[in-house]
Amino acid sequence: MATEYGQGYAPGDGHGYDGYDGGRGHGYDSGLGYGYDSGLGYGYDSGLGYGSSLGYDLDRGLARERRRRLPAVLRAPFEARSWREFGYVLLSLPIGIMLFVYAVTMVSLGAGLLVTFLGVPVLAAGLAGCRGFGAMERARARGMLRLEVADPEPLRTRKQGVPAWMGAVLKSGTSWRALLYAVVQFPWSVFSFVVAVNFWAYGWALLTYPLWFWVFPVYAGQGGLQLYGDTAHSVYLDNPFEITVTALVGLLFTLATPWIVRALTMVDRLLVHGLLGPSRLSARVVELESDRGVVVDTAAADLRRIERDLHDGAQARLVALAMDLGLAKEKLTEDPQAAARMVDEAHGEVKTALQELRDLARGIHPAVLTDRGLDAALSAVASRCTVPVQVEVDLAERPAPAIEGIAYFTVSELLQNISKHSRATWAAVDVWRVDGRLLVQVVDNGIGGADVSAGSGLAGLAERLDAVDGILIVDSPTGGPTRVTAELPWRGERALG
């Protein structure tokens, strides 16, 4: 470290310093991919060539694999995500200035003109502009931060015309949230810009100091980068040890900068998602509308199933029964023995039709569920399963009839799946209540492999549960066992006696 003493003042160099438990996920590493060139065949140079036409791009694949093996802290300064986030912070400052100036100008002008008839149109135009800027910011966050934010609810006007549109803009919470974003984003963009640029600039400048420190003795007349200076003495970074330490400090700054920028953009993500996305109320309305559609479709499908079962089952048997009884009546005087046989066969058909009607009624809503509750109803369902099923219901009171029915049919369908597909030798059903939620769990030791996303009956079951704010969780690794947990909202009916 070189130290100079003297009477002169050496100008100083400024320095800135700069988640419900119980699920088990299964993932697979994507491994090493092989890329194919666009040609065809194996050979050399012309036409059919190995490497020039068709081949495995092993070099690039191995390079990607080596990059993946590097620790994340070493990869971060060179990753595209880090540069996108840094670019987002850089753009935020000029955009923030534009949004802030526009918002403050339009709101101030509109508020000042409210004493005249021009105030309301100016204020509505200002809010509409903020909504447009909000759409631009959502697109910027989607492109640079990979943040997917749904569009907020559109303007709803009951009448046509400019006055109705202005009223809708002024009443919309989306408009005022976009205005709040334009005001709040500006000071945050200034802070994040200063922090990110200083860390990035100082980091790379110090890291590359061994490459450019020669500029000082050649052009500035001093030994190196000035660390300290006053009227008495000055300290420069000019020997190999100090240059190396400076580069190491720069390396630390460079490695830390992407993570600091990422932390800064997390606040931007929260601002965009919270102020420019749909409100919780509107999101809930959309969810309820979707759930209502699922309920309507489910009810229509159930009605079609009941009609089909009646038409193809009991109704067809009753028609055949009426015809057999008519024939037996005609033969009663001519051939009493044949008539008796036909009546006996008709009696069997009556028993079969009655059994089908009982099964159909049980599929609509079993009487045992209404009379005796989930414990008895699930025990009855378990007795019809092809594998032994242990049922345990631990409830101090009965849930509401709608929730009770959904829980019953959920277990019924899951036990049917076990009988048909699981190859299990035993199963268990547990029902209990925890913190205002009704939990239903069905476990079997079958082959596993059940998947809600495969479009099977489990997907329809999940949609039915979602219609009442329920959740279906499937844990079914290949080879088993399978554990399906249904969570339903609890609404009590009456205490069990």
Image (tube, rainbow, N blue to C red):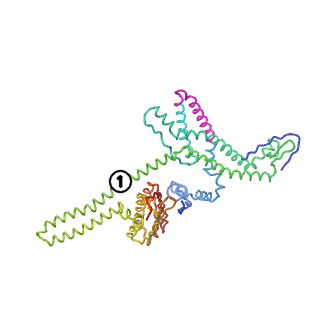
Up the image or down, 381 lies above or below 140; here it is below
Residue extent of the magenta highlight = 91-120
Residue found at x 58% / y 35%: 103
Does residue 210 appear left or right of residue 267 in this picture? Answer: right
Q: Residue furthest top?
A: 116
Q: How many marks?
A: 1
Up the image or down, 496 lies above or below 301; here it is below
Up the image or down, 342 lies above or below 300; here it is below
Image quarter hosting the C terminus:
bottom left
Q: Quadrant of residue 379?
A: bottom left
Residue 481 part of the magenta segment: no
Residue 214: % across, % down: 78, 46
Residues 82 and 33: in front is: 82
Residue 307: % across, % down: 30, 57
Q: Residue furthest front?
A: 497
Residue type indicated by callout 1: Ala
Residue found at x 43% / y 51%: 291
Residue 100 part of the magenta segment: yes
Residue 184: % across, % down: 61, 41
Q: Quadrant of residue 298?
A: bottom left
- The local secondary structure at tag 1 comes to helix
Residues 331 and 435: in front is: 435
Q: Residue furthest left?
A: 334
SS majority, magenta? helix
Residue 209: % across, % down: 75, 48
Q: Which residue was labeled with disc 1?
A: 300
Residue found at x 11% / y 69%: 333
Does residue 115 appear left or right of residue 415 in this picture? Answer: right
Up the image or down, 86 lies above or below 395; here it is above
Give the class, few, some or many, for how many residues have Cα within 10 Å of label 1's Cα (few <14, many ≥20). Answer: few
